[in-house]
Each structure stands twice: as C-alpha cells, then as structure tokens.
C-alpha cells in the first residue's frame, strides 16, 4: 500500500498521527502553501511568514531523513490554491492508493476535508489529532449532564488523569489553584529579561518577500519578526522561558507595563499551536523546574493551568459548540470594530500599547487581549463576529479552535456565560491598578464622566445599564448593581450621554 500523508501548517510535529508508521520507500508527504488558508481571514504578515517558514524547515528535515515530500510553494505554477485542490492534484499526479490525514484543528477545514473524502474514490483516513492531553470525546463525556462547564473542574480532572503537579491524590503545594497570588503589578525596580531572538535566515527572508508580494495589504509589520521557525530553536525558546521568566510568571501574570510587550510571558503559544513544541513536554518542563526548586509553586501551577487547564478546556468547548458557536451574540452587540484596532491611532494609552504590540510582534499577552482590547469591545458593544475576526487575523498563535472560545466566550460574554461565570467587564480602575498606562494618558482615570474622564469608566457603567435586563440576576454582578442602585437617575443619564457621545464618534 502506498500512502499520501497530509501535513498542514499547524501540524509540524514528526510524531503527528498521519506520519506514524510512514514507509519511506513508498509513501509521500504532502505539504502545500495555499492562498485559501492564507486569506480565510487576512492573517498578520508575521503569522503567514511564521507558518510558511516553519513548513519549509519541517519539510527539509523530513527530506533529510529520507522521506519523500511533495512540497508545493505558494507561487508554484499549478498551485490550485486550496488544500483539497492540492490533494486532488497529488492523487492525480502520483500512483498513491490511500490518503492519511490528521484531523484539522478548525471546523471549517475539517468539514471541507470530510466532504472531499466522502466524494473521493480513494481510501482516505482522517485520524484524531492526539497532540493534546484529552480528546474531544473525553470533554463531551465530562460536560454531559453538568449545569455549568467551569474550567477549574475540568482542569482538576486533568491534573488527576495526568498526575501533573500531583502527589498521589493531592495537589502539589497543598492547593489546586494559586491564582490569588498572581495579581501583582510590576514594580518599577523590576526589569523583564530580554527575549531570545531568532534572526531570520535566508529562507525566512525569501518567505518575507513572498508575503510582501502576495499579502502586502495584510495587517502587521515583518521588520520585528523574531520567531523560531524550527523545533530546535523553539526548544531554545522554551529553555530560555523556563530559566529566565517562569520564576516570575505567576506574580506578574496579570501585570501590564508601558513598552513591555512580553513581561514574563512565554511567547510559546505559536510553537505549541503549530506543532513545534508539544504541550506535554512544556508542562513537564515547568513541573521539573518546580521540583528542582528554581520556580515557585504559584508560577509553575499558574503556567501549567494555562496549558493543561485553559488550552484543553477551550478546545473542548469549541468542538462541543461548533458550528453554532461562531454566531453567538448573547448581548446583541452590533457596533462595527473601530478603525483604531487596525491603525493603533487612539489617545487611550492602554489600547495604543496593546494594538501597537499586536502590529509589531503579532503578539499581545493575555491581559492585554482580555482586559484592554477585549474589555473595550465588550463595553462598547462591538459585534462578536467582527471582533473575533480581528483576533483570528492579528496574532501569530491565532487559530479558531482557541480564538473563538477566548473571544466569543471569555472576552465578550457572547455565549451567555457558558465559559465565563460573569463578563470580564472592568473600568479604568482595573487598568490603573495593573499597569502604568494611565499615568501618561490624556484621560483621567479617576474621573467617571465628562470629556477628560477615562472612557473605560463611563463605558463600564453604561454597559451595566444597557445590559441590565440580561445581567442583573447574575450573582457575581451583585456588587456593581448594588453600586449602580445608589446612582441618581440624573447621574445615570449623564453616564449614558457621555457613553453615547463617545461611541457615536468612534470611526
Ligand atoms: P503565556 O501567558 O505564557 O501562557 C502559557 C501558555 O498557556 C500559552 O502559550 C498558551 O498555550 C496557553 N494559554 C494561556 N492562556 C490561554 C487561554 N486563555 N486559552 C488557551 N490557551 C491559553 N491563545 C491562542 O493560543 N490562540 C488564540 O487565537 C488566542 N486568542 C485569544 C483571544 C482573546 C480575546 C483572549 C482573551 C485570549 C486569547 N488566547 C489565544 C489566549 C492567550 O491570550 C494566549 O494563549 C497567550 O496570550 C499567548 O501568549 P503566551 O504564549 O506568551 O502565553
Ligand atoms: C494558518 C495557515 C496559513 C496561513 N497557511 C497555510 C497553508 O498555506 N497551508 C497549510 O497547510 N496550512 C496553513 N495554515 C494553517 C491552516 O489554516 C490550519 O491547518 C487550519 O486552519 C486548521 O487549523
């Protein structure tokens, strides 16, 4: 039997299910740079450059092992422009009799491939993607019959299942979750370390030219590209993170600071999501650092929870809820995404910082995504579908399976509380507590309304007023609604007036 084995741009793992048992004498691996995948949203230029460069390096490594790779570059003469088009072409032009595929991570492409395999005369097998701690069925079974699907309980179950950070049946450190310790602002005296940079080699620079030629009008800037494009370098990035950043990760996980795009975050999500690193090895490294005494428990647990907890959990939610999840809009938000999300031109320093980091690095850390750009979109009532499209386009780590639950569920509460027990809505006070942005902002974070007031302040109260019918009964919002009950009708009207005035002037 001769087999054509498909490897997608986010499946760059030599242990991928579709590559297991490969016969080097007879089988061929298919990898294709295609316009349909590069444009289903207008991805950040760095994301396309990362994926094409990593695909090319991965293909070369397999060839060095003696594996035959049919690698189709984007500007190859007969490139059909789609994954199924390239599968058809490969089958027609080779003598292969079976096709082996690892299921794509996104619903959209899985549907296309299933439709294709249903109508092809060849024997096509779609294998599960087992680069995760849990599979889709496991989450479905866990969710069955539960009133609410909280990450924390799924996470604890995975801790027990995997034994990660466990001492027999008990959590290491005596607690499941050390989040309470992980909310410190960055002191002025603490400087985050410089990050390991991977200067683009000649092959990567060749990809830059291709990206500029074909996707020159996409968002973002290639000049700051420093991503690793092969596993050996991604492993160096992991080492650097474990040694230099992880010890501080927990304490400053929620902090934000001017011109500090990365703080102590790992920047590993793109590598984990495209297969250069495996989530299991990343968690094991963090646990080993804790065991060696170089990393405190709040850091190790906080970091592992993001991967073993959140990452697994959002994947479960995605597959449980798709395709309807994409259309969720619990709060009926319909405002268009303001232009400044693309240009960074805004006088609100927090938003400017988050968006400029996004343009320069195809990166913003979680609190910037959730509590700055996400919080603004939530308070301003921006359409979840437009907001989601932006998040899917602008980050090097963005794939719908992880982006959708984070945007639609966590940031925008558009799923009505399936994922989050309350909206992550916050006024300027939160931003001021966790960052130094407000000190240089033209808006006054201490003022609630008026032209000098921080827009997050009146937008926050306006959000609570506007959505009162849907949110007042949420027990976790009892405190803000109690505060709101002390406002006079006149105060409420002033807040609504300023919010409306601000929002109507957004372009
Ligand atoms: P770190 O802060 O160092 O965290 C370590 C790892 O934990 C990450 O590399 C990632 O693998 C995992 N992780 C952390 N938080 C989450 C989370 N909430 N969900 C899933 N995994 C998590 N993450 C993506 O990988 N792709 C996305 O498209 C994406 N879109 C997001 C959209 C919004 C609106 C929000 C609020 C968050 C989104 N996240 C997404 C989650 C998170 O912000 C990123 O994983 C993280 O910022 C990546 O940077 P890092 O590697 O430095 O992460
Ligand atoms: C994101 C992406 C891009 C930009 N380009 C390609 C490509 O040309 N070829 C490919 O195989 N994969 C690419 N990808 C990743 C796919 O979009 C990804 O595999 C699906 O979205 C499923 O997660």
Image: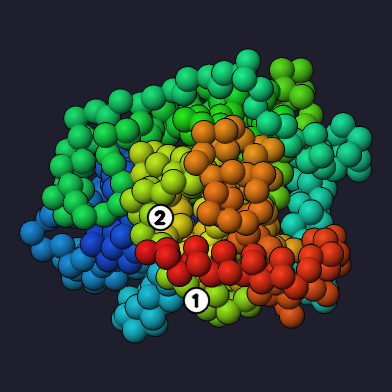
**Which quadrant is the N terminus positioned in?**
bottom left
The verdict on label 2 being within 8 Å of ligand 1 is no
At a point 55% along the width and 75% down the height, the residue shown is 333
At a point 58% along the width and 50% down the height, the residue shown is 453
Q: How is the image coloured?
A: rainbow
In depth, the one of 199 and 440 nearer the eye is 440
Q: Position of residue 286 (x, y in %)?
A: 67, 30
Quadrant in the rendering for residue 186: top right
| Helix, strand or loop at mark 1 | loop
161 is higher (above) or lower (below) than 495: above
In depth, the one of 245 and 313 nearer the eye is 245
Q: Is residue 453 visible?
A: yes
Left or right of residue 187, residue 372 in this image: left
Residue pointed to by mark 2: 341
The verdict on label 1 being within 8 Å of ligand 1 is no
At a point 45% along the width and 69% down the height, the residue shown is 504
Q: Position of residue 373 (x, y in %)?
A: 52, 53
Q: Position of residue 459 (x, y in %)?
A: 61, 61
| Helix, strand or loop at mark 2 | helix
Seen as rendered, the residue at the extreme front is: 490
Quadrant in the rendering for residue 217: bottom left
Residue pointed to by mark 1: 334
Quadrant in the rendering for residue 162: top right
In depth, the one of 493 and 164 nearer the eye is 493
Left or right of residue 356, residue 422 in this image: right
**Which quadrant is the C terminus positioned in?**
bottom left
Within 10 Å of disc 2 (Cα), the crowding (few <14, some 14-19, many 20+) is: many
Q: Position of residue 384 (x, y in %)?
A: 52, 70
Within 10 Å of disc 1 (Cα), the crowding (few <14, some 14-19, many 20+) is: some
Q: Which mark is residue 273?
A: none
Left or right of residue 490, residue 258 in this image: left
């Amino acid at each position: 039997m001769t087999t054509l084995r498909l490897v997608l741009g986010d499946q760059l793992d030599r242990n991928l299910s579709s590559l297991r048992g490969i016969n080097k004498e007879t089988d061929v691996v298919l990898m294709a740079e295609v316009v349909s995948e590069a444009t289903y949203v207008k991805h950040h230029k760095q994301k396309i450059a990362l994926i094409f460069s990593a695909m090319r390096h991965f293909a070369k490594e397999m060839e060095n092992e003696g594996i035959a790779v049919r690698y189709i570059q984007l500007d190859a003469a007969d490139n059909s422009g789609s994954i199924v088009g390239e599968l058809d072409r490969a089958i027609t032009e080779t003598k292969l009799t079976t096709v082996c595929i690892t299921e794509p991570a996104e619903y959209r492409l899985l549907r296309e491939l299933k439709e294709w395999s249903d109508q092809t005369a060849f024997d096509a097998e779609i294998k599960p993607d087992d680069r995760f701690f849990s599979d889709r069925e496991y989450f479905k079974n866990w969710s069955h019959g539960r009133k609410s699907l909280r990450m924390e309980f799924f996470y604890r179950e995975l801790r027990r299942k995997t034994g990660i950070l466990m001492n027999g049946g008990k959590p290491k450190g005596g607690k499941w979750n050390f989040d309470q310790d992980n909310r410190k602002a960055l002191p002025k005296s603490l400087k985050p370390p410089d990050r390991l940079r991977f200067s683009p080699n000649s092959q990567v620079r060749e990809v830059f030219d291709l990206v500029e030629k074909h996707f020159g009008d996409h968002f973002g800037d290639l000049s700051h590209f420093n991503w690793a494009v092969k596993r050996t370098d991604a492993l160096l990035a992991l080492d650097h993170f474990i040694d230099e950043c992880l010890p501080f990760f927990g304490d400053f996980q929620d902090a934000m600071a001017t011109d500090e795009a990365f703080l102590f975050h790992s920047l590993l999500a793109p590598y984990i999501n495209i297969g250069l690193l495996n989530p299991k090895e990343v968690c094991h490294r963090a646990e080993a650092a804790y065991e060696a005494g170089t990393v405190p428990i709040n850091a190790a647990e906080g970091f592992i929870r993001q991967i073993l907890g959140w990452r697994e959990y959002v994947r479960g939610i995605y597959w449980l809820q798709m395709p309807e999840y994409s259309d969720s809009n619990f709060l009926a938000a319909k405002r268009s995404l303001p232009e400044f999300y693309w240009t960074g031109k805004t006088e609100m320093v927090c938003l400017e910082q988050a968006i400029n980091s996004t343009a320069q690095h195809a990166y913003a850390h979680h609190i910037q995504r959730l509590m700055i750009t996400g919080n603004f979109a939530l308070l301003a009532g921006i359409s979840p579908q437009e907001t989601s499209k932006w998040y899917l386009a602008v980050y090097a780590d963005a794939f719908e399976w992880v982006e959708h639950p984070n945007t639609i569920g966590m940031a925008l509460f558009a799923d009505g509380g399936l994922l989050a027990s309350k909206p992550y809505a916050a006024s300027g006070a939160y931003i001021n507590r966790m960052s130094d942005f407000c000190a240089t902002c033209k808006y006054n974070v201490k003022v609630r309304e008026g032209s000098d007031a921080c827009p997050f302040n009146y937008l926050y109260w306006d959000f609570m007023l506007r959505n009162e019918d849907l949110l007042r009964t949420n027990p976790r919002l009892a405190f803000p609604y109690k505060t709101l009950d002390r406002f006079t009708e006149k105060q409420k009207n002033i807040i609504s007036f300023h919010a409306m005035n601000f929002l109507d002037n957004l372009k």
